Image: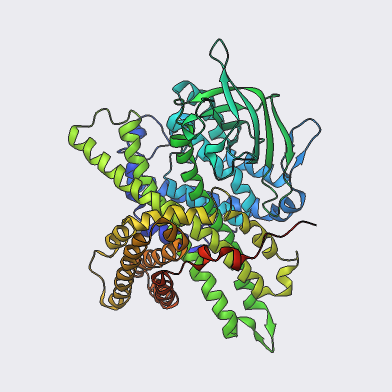
Amino acid sequence: MANFFTDNDDIQFLFEHMDVRYLAELVEDGFRFADEFDFAPTDADDALDNYRRILTAVGEITADEIAPTAEETDLVGNVLGDDGLVTYAPGIANAIKVLGQADLMGFTLPYRFGGINCPQLVYTMSNEMISRADASLMNIYGLQGIAETINAFASDQIKNDYLPDMASGKHTGAMVLTEPDAGSDLQAVKTQAYQDDQGNWFVRGVKRFITNGCGEILLVLARTEPEITDGRGLSLLLVERDPKVKIRRLENKLGIHGSPTCEIFFDDAPAKLIGERQRGLITYVMSLMNGARIGIAAQSLGIGEAAYRVARDYAHRRKQFDTAIENFPAVRELLVNMSVDVQAARALTYFATFSVDIENAALRKIELGEGAELDAAERKTLKQRARKHKRFNTLLTPMSKYYASEMSMRVSNDSMAVLGGSGYMKDYPVERHLRDSRITTIYEGTSQLQVIAAVRGVASGTAHTIIENLLDRDWPEEIQGLIQQIRDGLAVLDEDVAFVKEQGMEYMDLVARKIVDNAITLLVGALFCDYATAKDQKKAVARRWLADRMPQVHMNHEVIGSGDRQIISDFEILAGPVPVAE
């Protein structure tokens, strides 16, 4: 039987190489849950075996149940009926049912709500496999972050009322943020939430581009303080699917056709406040979006992996001039670049997710009532750990989303190049992968916004600290030359940061992508070198990565150091006049 976990050597390697045992100890809180729940692991070995079995089950379901329906789902899409109800494509509806029956819709939720309490890293691995099978399904499966947000911030009553049905797959959710005039600028949200004389909450307004807006549980960002016009006036509310929640249209999209993207009108819909007023955007949505960005990075990995595999197989089988086209140097370059690109995005995304797990575990013990028995020293250590990894994740999360999503476009595009005219036809899934990949660079924050967020972390020295932490060890002699290249590059990065700080924020934003790209090169290079100590194949990958990327680091360095602002100063000349509509 096919299996998207056991056929992927790189995911299996990272599962074994990364310290998943440590994450198990964190999320299981000393394995204390085994006394209360029969299916909770009793120790780290038991937990690792459990995670491996879960991933194997996901791999089997994705290969046998989901991937075979992806083409039909892309063609059929979703249907909005005259009754205002949305019908999923058959493959999507069946996948949600199967995943729920396999207890995979509450991946990171606590056992008491029917979840399986896995680390985010293991969930990210599952998200990648789901996306490789059908990227559009991940937009529903990956919205388990809705349940995580409810678990993190809602009252016990709301948790008990909603989380069990979400963990079982009976109910799906949606994050309802975007409006016609509030896309990236969520502080401009106008949808209103108000209370009646009895203190009951209601929501009124229009939301657009809402993934799975037809779900049963909607987390809505709305303005509860009409006198406050910025983000401080926004709160987060839970709205159930209701006759007062009207799906007005389904968007006609380029790709991910199995994922319904809805325009919603809330006609004074009943609601429940999540957490505290005025913390909707500043605390809750930012937490939700950070998780969503890791999810999109995982989705991008799945698309990239799927597209690469089609190209690799085709190049091996397709013959021209009496030889397989994989023997042509130009095709080999495409295939090697694609393979290394996917591995780089996976390394960065999994590393980021590992750091998120550490921060989340510390916060749970401190803030969610699980740290009541901690002594002062332990509490201080946990706070320091949480602060440290929050700083890391403020950089790593947008960096991963940016790099992985751009990678999925590059690899899908190059996959079509390998297949040529065949790839442009619907006979192969490459054209679907290319269409699906495009949205990954847009939703949950465009690549431009991710770069602006990440460059702040590079400029603050966080990237330097993370890379130095990775380099601070004894290295085998055969890898030391690669490590020296990274150290030399780190000096270049520090020089660039010092220079752009002198030039001001406008210039930093202008060259942000080049700075962030350089930081990614060095960070991924350090990760590849670490992997090379455990697997010989990764030595070749590390060498190829640095041989290809370090010249780009130096080229970017020259551009950054030039101080050229022509794009800003001569914008009207270079871009030309705004076209006049006829």
Compared to residue 36, the image places residue 1 above or below, namely: below
Q: Position of residue 322 (x, y in %)?
A: 68, 89
Task: Please report the residue visible at 62 percent of the width from the left and 65 percent of the height from the top.
Answer: 575
Q: Name the side, left or right, on which 423 lies relative to 122.
A: right
Of the pair 105 and 270, the residue shown nearer to us: 270
Residue 195, picture quadrant: top right
Task: Please report the residue visible at 58 percent of the width from the left and 49 percent of the height from the top.
Answer: 443
Q: How many tags in the picture? A: 0
Task: Please report the residue visible at 30 percent of the width from the left and 62 percent of the height from the top.
Answer: 470
Q: Name the side, left or right, on which 522 lies relative to 579.
A: left
Q: Position of residue 172 (x, y in %)?
A: 60, 35
Q: Position of residue 43 (x, y in %)?
A: 32, 43
Q: Name the side, left or right, on which 189 lies relative to 492.
A: right
Compared to residue 214, the image places residue 569 above or below, namely: below
Of the pair 370 and 536, the residue shown nearer to us: 370
Q: Please, which residue is most extreme toward the top here?
A: 197
Q: Position of residue 222 (x, y in %)?
A: 56, 30
Q: Quadrant of the N terminus?
A: bottom right
Of the pair 45 and 177, the residue shown nearer to us: 177
Looking at the image, can residue 568 be seen? Answer: yes
Residue 156, picture quadrant: top left
Q: Quadrant of the C terminus?
A: bottom right
